[in-house]
Amino acid sequence: MKTIDRTDFDKIQPKMQANMKVLEFTLSDLHFHTAQELRSLIKNKDGKTISLRALQNILKELNDNIYGNGKHNKIIRKHGEKGNPMYRLENNTELAFPEVMFTNQDRVLITSLLKMIAVFDGGLPINKLLTNLKIKNSEIKDFFHGKIDIEYNQYIHKWISILYDSIVQKKVIEIEYREMESLEKSTLTVSPYLLKNFNNRWHLIGHIHKPFSFEWSIFSLDRIINIKSHTGSKSFREAKLEIINEYYDSVIGFYVPTQKSSEIPKYLNPSMLKPFDIKIKVLDQSTFYYIQTNPIHKSQQCDAKKQEISFRVIENPLLYSKLFSFGSKIKVIEPDFLSEKIIDDAHKVINIYKTK
């Protein structure tokens, strides 16, 4: 069955569209309704119930011009008692106004899905989200099949819908989490704030409910073992998201190192960070184009004539890893301590492979 073409809807008078929508909503339950019942739903200019002839004109417009008289859908008519005809729809999968079938819950879910699609970067489990929305039309699910190949990520597929709902609904959750260094498991009570992606890894930013905890913490989705709703007495702890986003504006990734002798502050503020200006010379055109189109950092500025790239970030291990990954294709111009660090790391790599 072909889908209804809605491109000609603008040619139908708004009043007629409104009347068709009212009737379709009633008929979408797929039960027979009497003409008298349907007439009572629509009033004419005088505020009186419309005539049987006016009702039949609306139904004919809907049946013939919109449904194609069986091509997409069909209004079925039968004789009722005392000459009062009865009407019902053949199906409720092909409707002129499908929104009549939506519940308030459907609208909330669809709005959430659209917001997620707005930031979609290729990593969200859209099929699972469509299933949650009870959208089973294979045309939707299979539309991109064989045309776009997105790498499957089991952790995103498993957790991101739960976390997104918890963030939107401001729910406190219990996260069973595996620490990176010790590999020990712990259960944490968390107020979830943000989902962020870096290097194709998704992270949750949230507050841990325990004494002397940080203002917010970072959780990698691939180290989450289980998530469940919090049933205790903890209330959702609000956060200023603009402060969190600004804090990471000058950071590659999320790791922010501190002085060895100092403790990590519990309350974080962008003013604590000390970013510095970096300038690199790109030594071949293809690498320059790659970095230009795949920025090292969002503060990046490019000088195409000199093939130089500048950006402003704080010093952290991910900065060095990123620069070192370009090997001999780039040269750090400034600052000096950064180029010295790159040289030192290069010597260490050489010594690993050097034959004794």
Image (cartoon, rainbow, N blue to C red):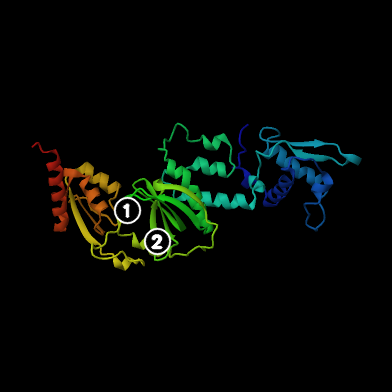
Q: Residue furthest left?
A: 356
- Label 2 CA crowd tier, 10 Å (few <14, some 14–19, many 20+): some
Mark positioned earlier in the residue sequence (1 or 2): 2
1 or 2: mark nearer the eye: 2
Q: Amino acid at mark 2?
A: Trp
Which labelled disc corresponds to residue 253?
A: 1
In the displayed structure, does residue 39 sit left or right of residue 15?
A: right
> Total number of numbered labels?
2
Disc 1 is placed on an element classified as: loop
> Which corner quadrant of the image does residue 73 belong to?
top right
User: What residue is shown with label 2?
Assistant: 216
Q: Is residue 119 above or below residue 62?
A: below
Q: Quadrant of the N terminus?
A: top right
Q: Residue at x 66, y 43 (%)?
A: 96
Type of residue at label 1?
Answer: Gly
Report whether 223 appears left or right of 300.
Answer: right
Query: Residue 86 falls in which quadrant of the image?
Result: top right
